[in-house]
Amino acid sequence: MKKITTYQNKKILVVGLAKSGVAASLLLHRLGAFVTVNDWKPLSENKEAQSLLDAGIKVVCGSHPVELLDEGFELIVKNPGIPYTNDLIRGAIEKGLPVITEVELAYQISDAQMIGITGTNGKTTTTTLVHHMLEAEKKKVYMAGNIGTVACEVAQEAEENDTMVVELSSFQLMGIETFKPSIAIITNLYEAHLDYHSSVHEYAEAKAAITRNQTEEDYLIVNADQPELMDLIGRTKAQLLPFSTKNEVSGGLYVMDNGIYFKDEFIISLSEIVLPGAHNLENILCAIGAAKLSGVSNQAITQVLSTFTGVRHRTQFVREWNGVKFYNDSKATNSLATKSALNAFSHPTILLCGGLDRGSDFNDLLPFLTNVKSMVAFGQTSEKMLELGKRAGIKELWSVSGVEESVIKAAEIAVPGDIVLLSPACASWDQHPTFEVRGDIFIDGVNKL
């Protein structure tokens, strides 16, 4: 960890706790800052805030009072989940105060090389693959960021010859100033998170920020199958490593003759890869690119791709029961992710779907339901999903109370050779605090069969 003095004796306000807020507060306190923490949850119910109070950090809980800005803070560190429309954050920006997220702190103190990974879909799978490939080459590597481990916490442990593989959301990237990964990846870009971002343009610019500070010494791995994305990153100074699942790309990564190539070098045949789904080819190409640029051998890459079956909650194979295969894709919180999951299977599929109603009619799913023989719907969007099923000509349509009951219903109607796929196309918050909780309930239900 770099012993920076940037924040010594400076008044800093950390807004929003959870894991990232706690880690940022403790780090800034360690760096000599005068830290105040503000969180909406009352102190009596807020174990994180109580622990920071015990550590000697000032805590203001129960709301986000704009009056805090009168206390002369020089910097705001914002939890990524708090929108910029929040009155306190908006007031800070109007006062000209810098507003950053903890990944910026992580970069400032890190001795390790950073590989940064963003995109609408595929971030977690790509991050995990890169981590496994570097590990297979016996390199010291850490996973951090949006994948669940706070980056500024990991950066305090990582040393000069280590590598941090950091998954980055658009929310995190909106709060960077100097952050500069030596290898950046943009898996893909689709319309998403418009309940947070003011426009599609703002969302796209947030994703493109991953390469904003890169120089000619750095690399950007980017999806050449998306012309709009290629236009968006046209300003980058980094060396481009394009990838394509459709065409041969000069100097990049591509699929040809049932094999994967890196700069015309054969890496692995598709038949050796065990991770299901055409959509995962993008993630695999990205991971191979980062691994090769990091000096990983083809042998180590092949070892990972021939054994890696998926990340938990992301088209994850759970088990086979009575000739029926169950897959957990609880991370599919939008229809785009569900399209990808449905495309991964050619067998008759029982689709378990539904959740938080954000106003979508899900019409874009219609062309992808051809292999769906039955639909089991739950949550706020249950009726919408069943109406979609009717339009698709699906004969067996069921409404159930939740994920646990959906597993029981799917087991009742499934026959050997079927796929049971939990791919909700909706967020979980109408019934569960996170998609992970929803997925764990599914896994538990399947294992109880």
Image (cartoon, grey):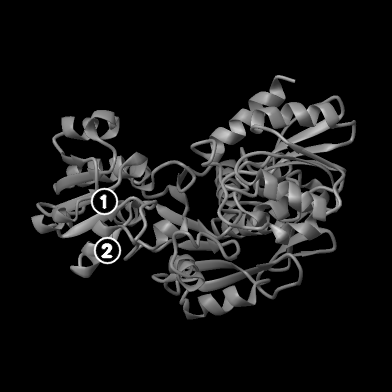
Coordinates of residue 254 in the picture (x, y in percent): 72, 66
Residue 40 rendering spot, x and y as whole percentages = 28, 43
Label 1 sits on a secondary structure element that is: loop
Residue at the image point whose x is 22% and y is 45% from the top: 38
Q: CA distance from mark 2 to mark 1?
A: 31 Å
In the rendered structure, which disc, 2 or 1, sits on the residue that comes first in sequence? Answer: 1
Please report the residue visible at 12 percent of the width from the left and 54 percent of the height from the top.
10
Left/right placement of residue 88 relative to residue 267 reads left
Towards the viewer: 277 or 142: 277
Circle count: 2
Residue 166 to residue 153: above or below: below
User: In this view of the protein, which residue sits in the foreground, 170 or 182?
Assistant: 170
- Please indicate, yes or no, whether residue 361 appears anywhere in the rendered image: yes
Above or below, comparing residue 42 to residue 260 in the picture = above
**For residue 210, what is the image quadrant?**
bottom left
Which quadrant: the C terminus? top right
Give the label on residue 90, or none. Answer: 2
Marker disc for residue 73: none
Q: Which residue is mark 1?
A: 2
Q: Residue at x 64, y 33 (%)?
A: 402
Nearest to viewer (mark 2 / mark 1): 2
Q: Amino acid at mark 2?
A: Arg
How many residues crowd around disc 1 within 10 Å: few (fewer than 14), some, or many (20 or more)?
some
Residue at disc 2, secondary structure: helix
53 and 298: which one is in front? 53
At x 22% / y 31%, what residue is drawn? 50
Hey, what amino acid is under mark 1? Lys
Q: Position of residue 426 (x, y in %)?
A: 60, 48
Categorize mark 2 by other alpha carbons within 10 Å: few (<14), some (14-19), many (20+). Answer: some
Residue farthest along the top direction in this orientation: 448
Nearest the eye: 420 or 130 = 420
